[in-house]
Every structure is written in C-alpha cells, then in structure tokens.
Amino acid sequence: MIRFCFRSVALAFLIGTVLPVTLHAQKTINVATSAAPFLRISPDARAGGMGEIGIATKADANAPFYNLSKVVFADAPDGVAVSYTPWLREISNKIYLATVSGYHKLDDNQAISGALRYFSLGNIQFADASGNPLGSSKPREFSLEGGYARKLGNRLSLALAARYVYSKLASGNANNSGVIYKAGNAFGVDISMTYNAMNEEGKGFTTGATITNLGSRVNYSNNSAAKDYLPSNFGVGVAYHLPVQEGHKFSFGMDLNKMLTPVIPDDSAGIASYYDYSVVKSWFKSFSSANGGFKSFQVSLGCEYSYKDQFFLRTGYFYEDKYHGDRNYLTTGVGYRYGSAMINIAYIVPSGNGATRSPLSNTLRFGAIVDLPWK
C-alpha cells in the first residue's frame, strides 16, 4: 500500500507529471494539474520509444490517442491495437495503464475509430498530515471514445472524436473534513488535422495539429464550487520519412504540446478566481505569463529506423522546462513485424539520482498492432 494525504492524489501521484519537480531558489514552480491526468499518458510503445511523438508519425491503430485524422492515410483498411504500461514502478508495482483501440475505413476517404483506456492505481491508504490513517481506496479511471476522420482532397484530412471520462480517486469522507468525495464524470472532444506530403515511395513530410480533451469540468466531491478542468491540450507535429535504399528507411519527428489548463494560484483570492474561470477562458489563461506562456510547451524528438518494414529500432528525447514539470528523459524502443502483426517495446532510460531521480525511470511499455485483413 501507499500512504499519503488525499490532496497528493490529484496533485502529484497519478501520472508523475509533477513528481519529478525539484525546487529551484527564487523561482516559481508553475505545474498545471487537472482532473483525469491519465489522459496525458502516452500509451503506445511505438511512440514511447521515440520520445512520445505521435501527431505526424505513420498512421496505425493507435492513432486515436495522438491524432485521429491521420488514420485515413493508414495502409490497411482495418486495424486493432492493445497496450500495457506499468506506470511509476519506482514508486509502486500496482499502477498500470491498459488500452485497446482500432479503426475501420469506410472507403478510401473516411474512417471510424474506437478506443478504451483503463488506469489503475492499485490500493491506496490515505493519511492526514500527521500520518493518521483515514481509510483506503482503490482508485480507477477509464475513458471510452469514438471518432470519425475524413480526407479533404488527396493530402489533407480532418477528424472529430468524442470521449466519456470516468475518474474515481476516493469515496466518502476520506480526510475527515466533512467533504464527501465521489467519482467524477466528464465528456470531451478532440479536433485534429493531418497534411500528408509523402510521395508514392514513402518519402516526404507529414504534419499534424490537434486540440484534445475539450470538454466539461469534473467534480470529485459535494463541493460544487471545486470543479477541476480536463487536461485540454494543443499539439503540433512534423515528421520526415526517408527511404535511403531498398529495405532501409528512417523517420524523424518532432511534437510540441501545450497543456491548456492554467496553474492553480497559491493565494486564496487567486484560487477563487481559478475555479470561476469558464472552460474556454481557462484555455486562454494557460498562455499567460503567470502560467509560463510558451515556456510550458513540451518538446518530443524521435527517430525510427526500419529494415524491410520488419525490424525497427527507435530512440527519442522528451523535454519539459524545469519550472513546469521538469520531465526530461531519453527513450529507446524496438519493434518486430510478422505478417500483419507488430510487437513493440519501449523503455525510459533512468535519469537523476537520489531525491532527483525521475519516478518514470525504467518505465516499460508493451504493445501489439494487427492490420486487417491478415496477410
């Protein structure tokens, strides 16, 4: 079991977005938090091996998690994918994310998709600031989503997806404060686009842009004024695909992501204003200087080498400003294709030492993709 106070569930523990942060003298730590932060975890082992890029990479059945619009450019008419990610194993061996996703092309110009994410935090023992036990809980979260993508010409595509989110962190009077905790529910949408400039030989650029998790706020308690925002995100990506000789191919990519959720102020008046923001106002507030502005963008760089479209080697780097999360790590990955099935494994290389060691160190992701019909 893990012992900590309830507030740390939402602010620190769930996905490691703020756990790597260390204090820096005379600087403000501007880490944005949100409801259902599991939606920010990159589940796909292929993307995980390339620094978590996925907006403009080659389309497969994991496209709904990154950029649904690119799925109309997939080679196969249908595809399914599954993944399993043990999460924060530096802290607990009970946390994991499991996903399943798929798509079906209606014709050459349009496709539909579906996906499910399930996030488990094991069993958590709650405690107050003095360490006194306050009961336990088994936090669980999931999202169920579906979408539609369509080509607008030979190179451009757009997509729209809808998502239902269920997030249960605790229930009942978990901290003896009189606040009754409950499961949160929300609905969100994704809007995405892709421009595919590759030629028939598979050489050229692909670009994409996404706005994800635009939706309702989440209430975890009987306090109707304290509703949290979904982890809305704006992302852009570019990739270049380069066949160098028969059987050998390289792909290079970069994603930029900006969380569209403002930082919670550290004063009572600011906190009151924070919870009074409309959802739309919160998106624009996230770009203010108080929220880090453009310094709060996350940068992902990745590279993939493939041989005969059967053996794959990958590497990448994920960067986040030290005052806005401080997640910085190197990733590696491998893949093997047999027929229409591909197995992928990704690994986050350990970083930091002692108190500065990243809780994401040694994270493994496992995934399988099957293109249909089987060849």
Image (tube, helix red, strand yellow):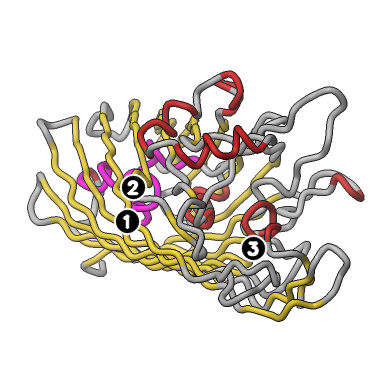
Element at badge 3? Answer: loop
Q: Which residue is mark 3?
A: 87
Location of residue 375 in the rendering, given as x and y in whole percent from the top left corner: 26, 67
Q: Nearer the viewer, residue 309 or 105?
A: 105
Element at badge 1? Answer: strand
* Mark 1 or mark 3: whose residue is earlier in sequence: 3
Q: Which residues are magenta?
A: 53-72
Q: Residue at x 31, y 57 (%)?
A: 163
Location of residue 284 in the rendering, given as x and y in whole percent from the top left corner: 42, 26
Is label 1 or label 3 in front? 1
Mark 2–mark 1 distance (CA, rounded to whole Å): 6 Å
Numbered disc total? 3
Looking at the rendering, which quadrant does residue 176 occupy? bottom right
Q: Residue at x 34, y 43 (%)?
A: 214
In the rendered structure, which amino acid carries the disc numbered 2?
Gly
Q: Which residue is mark 1?
A: 187
**Rendered position, 296 above or below 312:** above
* Mark 2 or mark 3: whose residue is earlier in sequence: 3
In the rendered structure, which amino acid carries the disc numbered 1?
Phe
Which SS does the magenta portion mostly show?
Answer: loop
Mark 1–mark 3 distance (CA, rounded to whole Å): 25 Å
Left/right of residue 161 with respect to residue 318 in the rendered view: left
Location of residue 245 in the rendering, given as x and y in whole percent from the top left corner: 42, 33
Left/right of residue 267 with respect to residue 212 in the rendered view: right
